[in-house]
Amino acid sequence: MNWDYLLSLFMGGLTRGSIYALIALGYTMVYGIITLINFAHGEIYMIGAFTALIAIGVLTLAGWNGTAILLIAAVAAVVYAAAYGWTLERIAYRPLRHAPRLSALISAIGMSLFLQNYVRMAQTANFLPFPNLIPEFAFLKPVAHIVRSSELVIYAVTALVMLLLTLLVRFTRMGKAMRATAQDRDMAMLSGVDVDRVISLTFVIGSAIAATGGVLIASHIGQINFYIGFLAGIKAFVAAVLGGIGSLPGAVLGGLVLGWTESFFTGYVSSDYEDVFAFLFLVGILIFRPSGLLGRKQMEKV
């Protein structure tokens, strides 16, 4: 058995899974608060990557160089994507807060298509190169054929985001308000919780996390285009359902399981059916364990 090849597939799956997890966290946060699948979330991920590329170009022309450019560009992408998330909630979802769920779902799909085509017309339909400004770490040279420094950064950022998000939800005043809103929105309002503010903040945080994933994966792969958010968003949704949508640990677990499954499937079977396999995975989850790996069965009162 080729252990180097096996380990490289494992690390590649961990990279994919970490990015899926970062996007899935936004899906599961929004669903947990207002039971809405924000299908435009993948486009926020894509917009974050494009924002970082534009910022890198501006900083390069201004004479900046090195890893500092990527850090500043990442901050710009996070802020810009967070603003998009806030605007999206105010324009596309808040007016439909009390409408049938199908109305909000159609609005989400419409916003996804709008943002895709908006970026395609504003930028280009072609793939654009994205510079990898993450330096190669000296201690990784012996295993450079298995794991790259950009992958290590992705792992570290995903773990840090999950830790900070867990601390926010469990130990802060806003986190308590988020949990109260998720449990019973009307009762939370009666208790003095500003529900509109909580929902807006949820969109802002989820969008910022998705933009972080977009910048990291663009730097790792080395190219972007307007369509990268759609497929990544759909797969992150699969990851969220797999882990148990509404569960933060479930989103991370689902992303990692999907990433490893895809990596080993493409490595040992065929890469031609990689996307098909992900959707078959979703069908299997919905049939055999619709609540997900860490999700709880919902009891309905009759």
Image (cartoon, rainbow, N blue to C red):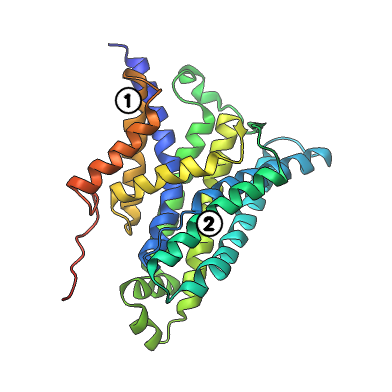
Q: Is residue 238 above or below residue 169?
A: above
Quarter of the figure that contains the N terminus: top left
Secondary structure at badge 2 equals helix
Asked if the residues shown at circle 2 and circle 1 are in contact, with their CB atoms under 8 angstroms apart, the answer is no
Residue in front for this viewpoint, 194 or 66: 194
210 lies left or right of 101: right
Amino acid on which disc 2 is placed? Gly
Mark 2 surroundings: few (<14), some (14-19) or many (≥20) residues within 10 A: some
Quarter of the figure that contains the C terminus: bottom left
| Count of numbered labels shown in the rendering | 2
Secondary structure at badge 1 equals helix
Name the residue that disc number 1 marks. Answer: 265
Residue 201 in picture, x, y percent from top left: 51, 68
Residue 165 in picture, x, y percent from top left: 43, 58
User: Which badge, 2 or 1, comes first in the chain's sequence?
Assistant: 2
> CA–CA distance between discs 2 and 1?
33 Å
Q: Is residue 196 above or below residue 5?
A: below
Name the residue that disc number 2 marks. Answer: 110
Residue 260 visible from this viewpoint:
no
Point 68% across, 41% down: residue: 53
Amino acid on which disc 1 is placed? Phe
